[in-house]
Image (cartoon, rainbow, N blue to C red):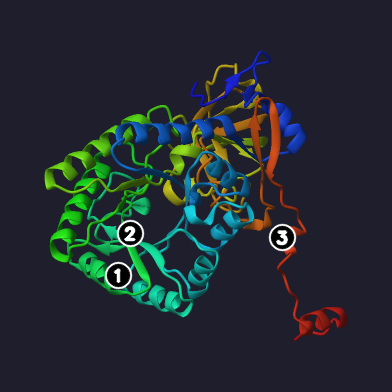
Amino acid sequence: MMLFGTQRINESGRLEIGGCDTADLAREFGTPLYIMDEELMVENCRRYVRAYKRLYQEGETEIAFAGKAFLTMSMCIIAAREGLSLDVVSAGEINTALKAEYPMERIIFHGNNKSVEEIELALDVNVGRIVIDNLQEIDLLNRIAVGRSKSVDALLRLTPGIDPHTHKLIRTGQADTKFGLNIKDGSAMKGVKAALAAPAINLKGIHCHVGSQLLDTEAHEQAAEVMVAFMKEVLDETGYEVEQLNLGGGLGIRYTESQKPPSIEEFAERVIGVVRREIARLGLRLPRLIQEPGRSIVGEAGATLYTIGAIKEVPITEDPGRRTYVAVDGGMSDNPRPALYDAVYTAFVANKANQRADWLVTIAGKHCESDTLIKDTRIARADAGDLLAVLSTGAYNYSMASNYNRFPSLAAVLVRGGRAEVIVRRGTLDDLLANDVIPERLRSAATSGVGG
């Protein structure tokens, strides 16, 4: 059985996380429920910081948590406490960090189509760096900054032309992408020159991100080579020496036992090895090296707990001639990744975790779609009312959740040392109506019974 962090099977045969029995968590907080293992998240943060400092000791390093993976005010506080910077991509994420009193100077603001309002907010709250995505943004950012009499530290997002081995919808480093300035076609150099010429922009460095859920380091190593070579081109052509090299995130996690991504330490060793080698070969100074992990910090630290409901068998044409559907009380509104990316997860019956998993079933959600969470997986024999735990849901589940079919949002709890604390309260039916507005003409027609 695949278990992560503080997850274990306790003496009662039930799944325990952070010293908390999942059956107790279900009774206290209800289901579906996101459960986040604080101890594992903290340890992952510290492993990144330790590895990068040890392997890049002659230069400065910076680990920035990719907030898009899982961003709450509590997560901002954990990141701040562990010395991590924070990668954000919207006004909402900036505001979350602001309300959590996260230090604004440690924020790196990304986005391929930042609005005027978002840029103005970033400047008003003094975010540390803005990552410029395109040539128009250079002009826009400079104009807004000049109008506010401010100077902006910035990085340029570049496209290194690397096609990683991952799902097509989470590849971002190849030439055909909406992100960044292409190195090969000259757009990146044009962007460097424009940024250097902009009076309100203080160009600090360059950034790239090749993709997500990568199970080897090949794409990152190739990207590091391309980016360092570009640093040399920039120095030769403009005289500007890049101070900061941000290689993004993308390290994958284990969703199934067959997936074996590099450890944090292995990832750091391979990527830093390439950077150091190429910097030395080209005679450059070591830049500040920045990595932006998200999934690899929180992914395996999360689990989602469901209550099993309807169970039914249906005939199918392929072997074995029948399929058993086990329905749970959530689905694509709390985990859209199977529908979006064909993502595969591991699950087991949390209150029967010590029993043999020999029952072939398909886990279905309760939404008005096919809504298959896991197809053809083996779990222990279960009944309505049993609890199903789906592992590795800490990244891009809460953050991509919706209210489809008017489902209230899930609660999230942080567990550690036998203590469970709510970090996201469960949504209510009335919360779903909070932004609904009825025009007066419709209200009048409804009360009078007259059609329009």
Q: Are marks 2 and 3 in contact (CB under 8 Å)?
A: no
Front residue of 103/178: it is 103
Q: Is residue 204 above or below residue 366?
A: below
Q: Is residue 69 above or below residue 133?
A: above
Kindly identify which residue carries mark 3. Answer: 432
Residue under the point 34% across and 31% down: 54
**Numbered label attached to residue 204:** 2
| Structural distance between the alpha carbons of marks 1 and 2 | 10 Å
Q: Residue 358's x, y, as percent?
A: 52, 21
Front residue of 33/242: it is 242
Which residue appears farthest toward the right when viewing the image?
448
**Left or right of residue 270, residue 281 in this image:** left
Residue 232's quadrant in the figure? bottom left
Kindly identify which residue carries mark 1. Answer: 195
Q: Residue 245's x, y, as percent?
A: 30, 51
Placement of the C terminus among the 4 image quadrants? bottom right
The earlier-in-sequence mark between 2 and 3 is 2
**Left or right of residue 181, residue 313 in this image:** right
Callout 2 crowding tier (Cα within 10 Å): few <14, some 14–19, many ≥20: many
**Left or right of residue 36, residue 155 in this image:** left
